[in-house]
Image (cartoon, rainbow, N blue to C red):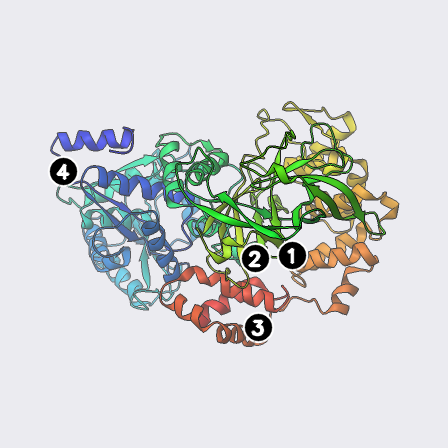
Amino acid sequence: MSESKDFLRTIVEEDLQAGKYNEIVTRFPPEPNGFPHIGHAKSIVINFGIARDYKGHCNLRMDDTNPTTEDTRYVEALKDAVEWLGFQWEGNVRYTSDYFPELYEYAKQLIRMGKAYVDSLTEEEIREYRGTVTEPGRRSVYAQRSVEENLDLLERMKNGEFKDGEHVLRAKIDMGAANMKMRDPLLYRIRHAHHYRTGDAWNIYPMYDYGHCISDYLEGVTHSICTLEFENNRDIYDWVLDTLGLKNPRPYQYEFARLGINYTVMSKRKLLELVNEGYVNGWDDPRMPTIAGLRRRGYTPESILSFCHQIGIAKANSMVDVAQLEFCIRDDLNTKVPRVMCVLDPLKVTIENYEGSEELDASYYPEDVPKEGSRKLPFSREIYIERDDFSENPPAGFYRLTPKQPVRLKHAYIITCKEVIKDDLGNIMEIIATYHPDSKSGSDTSGIKVKSAIQWVEAATAKTVEVRLYDRLYSCEVPEGVEDLNPDSLKIIKNALVEPTLITEKPDVRFQFERHGYFYADPIDYTDEAPVFNKIVGLKDSWNKKVKEGDVVAKPEHKATEKKIQIDGEVAPMNEVEQTRFNKYTNELKLNSEVSNTLARDEKLSSFYEAAVAVNHNPITIANIVANEVARELKEKKIDELKFTPEQIAELVKMIDDEIISNKIAKQVFEEMVQSGENPSKIVEAQGLVQISDPAVIMPIIDDVMAKNPDNVEKYKAGNTKLFGFFVGQVLKATGGKANPQIVNVLVTQKLQ
């Protein structure tokens, strides 16, 4: 077995030794109401891994009992995730909806046994009657209905004679049970909604606790493995199977700790909000913790499997550092991918004493990677280097090119700066350099000592590419909502330059761009004519600043100031005024600690913030704008030099609240406010930036996108559901970000059905 012995495998082995089961059968039973995420990957690895290790099998079953939230595209995404991770389910995909007839018959059996009844209390009354942890509940008066009346009502519920919520079917167990889950739990509820598989055949749908255990039994599952939040539900699981007297062998439920990762949310509700509100570009946005997102970013199945194996299987919940996931992809790619050169911020270098051109031999892999492969690098007098690889006034410890310090061009020659050419504003436009002919890499006889080698590309043959620099989606360790989003989670560079072999020879789809990190050719947007590369992960963990639990995390200062609040893991203490502000912002206004810290420590920011909140009491949204956009402006200006006011920021936020503009458009409006000082409402009116929410306006744009991308439409309908985000993105792009993302999602879904 590949995994070490964990408590679940110990249980399985004991059951096999005792002869409890002839074959181990597990199942992965997700709800098809969203795309699977990294937490689902852990469950997939556990369930399929245990079945594999003990020569059993694992079923893939969609727990499709809520027709209001489920969709076939989620089913396809779940199937795709299992296969991409390298697993195969037994037989066909199974569905809880396959068992609706059997579940209904078992429900009638419970009624005949006097163990279930139709209750007509309202949802609020059911909650009230349940009692508390210290007080027993009260049983509904409707529990006295006869068997005949209950069977009649259940049949009429199924036939659609009653409204949603008018009746429910409940188990009759114990209203005084210490485990409140056992206080007559719901078995069925009325839902007048079209089911994506059964259509309108059913008007009642089983609850998870009822449908799940019987589905396990019907499939011959032996070990029903779920996450720890279902621990109290185990009593219902056992009660249903025991009360029905289902013969052995029967399944038993076991719980493990669910996966929690810092700087990440895995709540489906919160992920759905990110997608529907346009904070990300679909379920497969490379910043998302979804399998589709990780896959599009460039993560490999091997790295995800390695991560799941490393974190192990525990009985107690804990938080895993996202750096461990990032380590796994670095570790996997380190021995696999070619090393190539890319310049993100090009600075031209003219080597005045070089004539002609040549091709230099360059290996794709360093000596410690046991792989072969090389390419020819074009070289001539005009090249580009990274702008930050040159410093006219270098700080201590700067080992790259300076007016007095030569440097090696990787795989090429040593060059020396001769002249710095600037524009009228003093910006460096070009470096005039000389090269040392006897310093060629691999045959250097120059005797010149240099301390580093820098990347470069030849000007004439370099390929222009778009590079998407992805970072963590959230800026704080334990994010709560969209107010904690990292505003710098995506930076797009349109005119990066790469050496030509990436495009012409295509030695791989993943690369290490030297000094920058690991990158992946975007599987949807990449073309040879317009190449796009996604940053998978940096070469090292740049977030690894440990602070003690309870410490305030200081917001990084602007690089230009070279000022640091945090030193050796300690945070400079606040004075009394700052601490009072911080307490107010976190306790009264509910800001997260990082934003509160930023505002509390800065008198100018806190004054500006409080003036804006006094006009529009939306403290969280205003705080994020002030702590990021306004703070950026105040790095370079005094507060009386700003062209916009707190009142205008309050007005801008109100326009977001009223859905007049989207968050994306709000950023555009803010940039105009910075330049002109004009009121946001006038900017929106003058530039026609009002959010488009009228389906009649949006639908023709969707039609146009579909007409221009017939191949992608066909691919989507053939099962490539990750293209959904592509269509939404194209519509938003066509409207300049003005279309309401929620309405776009709904209309695109309808169009693709």
Discs 3, 2 touching: Cβ within 8 Å? no
Q: Is residue 682 visible?
A: yes
For the residues labelled 4 and 2, the Cα–Cα distance comes to: 48 Å
The answer to which image quadrant residue 731 occupies is: bottom right
For badge 1, the amino acid type reads Asn
Q: Is residue 663 above or below residue 727?
A: above
Pointer 4 residue:
21
For the residues labelled 3 and 4, the Cα–Cα distance comes to: 57 Å
Q: Is residue 521 above or below residue 692?
A: above
Q: Is residue 288 visible?
A: no
**Disc 1 secondary structure class:** helix
The answer to which image quadrant residue 494 occupies is: bottom right
For badge 2, the amino acid type reads Glu
The image shows residue 53 at horizontal and vertical percentages of: 22, 37
Discs 2, 1 touching: Cβ within 8 Å? yes
Answer with left or right where residue 214 lies relative to residue 333.
Answer: left
**Disc 2 secondary structure class:** loop
Answer with left or right where residue 39 lies relative to residue 518.
Answer: left
Mark 2, Cα crowd under 10 Å, few <14 / some 14-19 / many 20+, is many
Residue 663, numbered circle: 1
For the residues labelled 3 and 2, the Cα–Cα distance comes to: 16 Å
For badge 3, the amino acid type reads Ile
Comes first in the chain, label 1 or label 3? 1
Q: Is residue 539 above or below residue 145?
A: above
For the residues labelled 2 and 1, the Cα–Cα distance comes to: 9 Å
Pointer 3 residue:
698
Pointer 2 residue:
277
